[in-house]
Amino acid sequence: MVDEGDEVLLGDPRSGRFVAVPPVGGAVIRALQAGATVDQATAVAEDLAGEPIDVPSFLAELQTLGIGGAEAVRPVRSAPIQQRRWVYGPGRARARPMFGPPAWILYGAAFVFGVGCLVVRPDLWPSPHDVFILDDVGASALLLVVMNLAGATLHEGWHWLAARAAGVPARFGVDRRWNFLVVETDLSQVWTLPRRQRYGPLLAGMAVDSTVLAVLLASQLTARIGIWEPPDVVARVTAAVVFLVVSGMAWQFLVFFRTDLYAVLVVATGCRNLWRVKTLLLRRAVGRLTPEEAIELVGASARDLHVGRWFRWVWLLGFAAVVGWFVLFSLPILVSVLPWIGAGLGAGPQDMRFWSAVACIPLVLIARLTVVGLVLRDLGKRLSEAKRPQHLPEEAKTPR
């Protein structure tokens, strides 16, 4: 249980389910945890509320939502492909030094230095063509996949380590944002922490990205001003990684994709179910709100409604931002790789270029094909649920 102003956040860390209840609900749980019977907890609640309280129904509703049951609970799936269990290692003491005040001062300085370099020295801005480290496009595409995977592992691993430093577990998964494939860390457990302690795990990925970017830009800057002359391979690899880090950090600012900064927005504004409320407000704006959804919207929290009124338009404008991100970072690479594949396939099986192109095709298409598979899976699940009678209330959403 976490007290948050006029609400109490109740959750079951085993399942990752969390709901916000009035203070009287928190009083009931605290009484039960102290050893009170249900009747005694009811008396405590009625004294606090000044009116009759149906505590048995309240407890039954919590168990229906997967909170407070005595039986073993499997964590709620928050991504189509995901670990089933929470990752509790390494120990908190080992992870904490990387996320103490000195570390965060370093991360902040690295972010400011990186942004400053790109603003003051526009010649340091990366180019999409920097990712082609080798003269062979296919080999460069293979290296790009490896470097992307390494970067994602470091970013998500830092989320996990920051969660461990805060004393909570995390787990990894694969999901999609529209037609983009993403790797993500489920940080639902940060809801068990006081609000100010949630920011560290959420910002940890960008913190390590900022540090890597600062080191690489410092290397490039010192080379440009003649302090040292790196070997050609080092310069090429550095330029490629700078491009990947900058594009990844730019992605985090696309809050309408439920990125790290979206999670920070949710925590900072005190929202509980912003994504759903945003959807309902949009449906109401275009006249597509059903009677059931109208009732759901009426019951939404004041914070979600207040933020959702402007966030829904941010989400709509996000389509233009996605196009811009795609044009800046993804399209130039595809424009270079696809003609190379076409030329290789046109050379015929007797030419090695043909087989290099064939080997490169999965690297280019695997993310897109995975997204298609996830879309089909979601569609099949929705059709199956539509045919099944619905008796249980909707589960509480946990922002990631």
Image: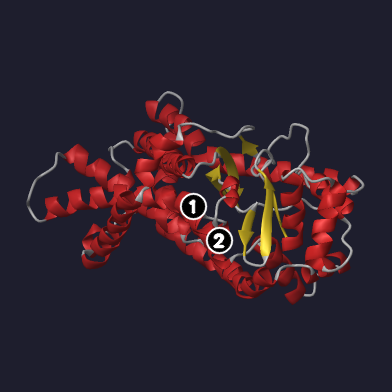
Crowding at label 1, few (<14), some or many (≥20) Cα neighbours within 10 Å? Answer: many
Residue 38 is left or right of residue 7, and the answer is: right
Residue 274, image quadrant: bottom right
Crowding at label 2, few (<14), some or many (≥20) Cα neighbours within 10 Å? Answer: some
Mark 1, residue position: 202
Determine the residue positioned at 90% across, 44% down: 388
Residue 124 is left or right of residue 374, and the answer is: left
Determine the residue positioned at 68% across, 48% down: 11
Residue 267 is left or right of residue 133, and the answer is: right
Q: Against 300, is 20 above or below?
A: above
- Please state which of residues 32 and 65 is positioned toward the viewer in this rendering: 32
Q: Against 260, is 16 above or below?
A: above
Residue 287 is left or right of residue 327, and the answer is: right
Q: So how many labels did they put on this image?
A: 2
Which residue type carries mark 1?
Leu
Instruction: Say which element carries label 2.
Output: helix
Q: Position of residue 170 (x, y in %)?
A: 55, 40
Residue 25, image quadrant: bottom right
Determine the residue positioned at 26% across, 41% down: 237
Whole-number angstrom distance, CA of label 2 to CA of label 1: 10 Å
> Which of marks 1 and 2 precedes in the sequence?
1
Which residue type carries mark 2?
Val
**Cβ–Cβ under 8 Å for marks 2 and 1:** yes
Q: For residue 137, which numbered disc appears in the image?
A: none
Q: Position of residue 392 (x, y in %)?
A: 86, 49
Does any portion of residue 49 appear in the rendered image?
Answer: yes
Q: Position of residue 89 (x, y in %)?
A: 49, 31
Q: Position of residue 214 (x, y in %)?
A: 26, 52
Does any portion of residue 393 appear in the rendered image?
Answer: no
Q: For residue 267, which numbered disc appears in the image?
A: 2
Instruction: Say which element carries label 1.
Output: helix
